[in-house]
Structures are given as structure tokens and as C-alpha cells.
Amino acid sequence: MPKKPDQVVFDNELQAYNAKITPYATNVGAPKIEITDITHWKNNTINKVNHQLGAKFKEIQEEYQKLMQQYEYNTLIYEAKFSFEPTVGKIYHLYKKEDESTFLSLLSPQECKFNFIKSFRLNANQIWEVI
């Protein structure tokens, strides 16, 4: 088979002209192929994504801090002394004795002179919430 001129796009293996399926221009009169500069778009998108992920990370950190705080309070209460079964939804008060032990009471800080720590309410999941 004779060699075709450079401007003719011929596939020797397929024995066919394939100018219409090439991803590049095949003759001098074809429009110039220009690569779109997407640097600005990438930079803006990276900025937005980093900001969004940073905000989500901060939100998760704050949620983790709240969860750890709740865990610490629940541990403190469940380790405290009390001789009654707490009722869901009712407010209880945590106090510290002189020997550093803690106890849970129904008495509010205005009704007694104990060393008050915090007030709590027991929710339906048996988790103590700070009031």
C-alpha cells in the first residue's frame, strides 16, 4: 500500500480513513484546539471544599466535646451516692461532701447549705442532662 500524505488520516491496520474520530485537528483548515484553563475554577473549588470540610470538622469536634462532657457528668452522677430511684424528667442536684464524695439529692441549692455542683435532669434514655 503506498504511503498517504501527512494531511490524510488513514489507519493502516483498519484500512480506513479515521479523520472524523480523532481527538485532534487533522488538516490545516481545522479550528485550533485550545485547552481550557481551569486553574481558577480548581482554586475556587479547593477553597470552598476546604472551608466546608473545615466547618464540618469543627462541628464534629464540638459535638465530640459535648459528648465527652455528657459522659463525664453521667459518670460523676452514677458514681455519686443516692438511695432512691431517679424519675425520668425530674430535676436532681449534685452536691459534694467535705470528704470529697458526691451525692444526689432532690433538695435544691436554696433549700440546703451543701456544697452544690450542678443540677441535672434524667432523660428517657437514662442519660443525665445538665440544667
Image: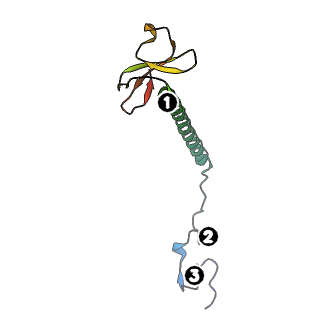
Q: Which amino acid type is shown beneath numbered disc 2?
A: Val
Residue at the image position 44 percent from the left and 26 percent from the top: 129
For discs 2 and 3, the disc positioned in front in the rendered view: 3
Q: Is residue 121 above or below residue 9?
A: above
Q: Which amino acid type is shown beneath numbered disc 3?
A: Phe
Q: Which quarter of the image is occupied by the N terminus?
A: bottom right
For discs 2 and 1, the disc positioned in front in the rendered view: 1
Q: Could you tell which of marks 2 and 1 lies nearer the N-terminus?
A: 2
Residue 37 point in image, percent of width and height: 61, 52
Q: Is residue 42 above or below residue 24?
A: above
Residue 27 vs residue 23, the one in the foreground: 23
Q: Which amino acid type is shown beneath numbered disc 1?
A: Gln
Tag of residue 70? 1
Its colouring scheme is rainbow
SS at circle 3: strand
Residue 115 vs residue 57, the one in the foreground: 115
Residue 67 point in image, percent of width and height: 50, 33
From the image, tell me which residue sits under label 2: 28
Tag of residue 93? none
From the image, tell me which residue sits under label 3: 10
For discs 1 and 3, the disc positioned in front in the rendered view: 1
Q: Could you tell which of marks 1 and 3 lies nearer the N-terminus?
A: 3
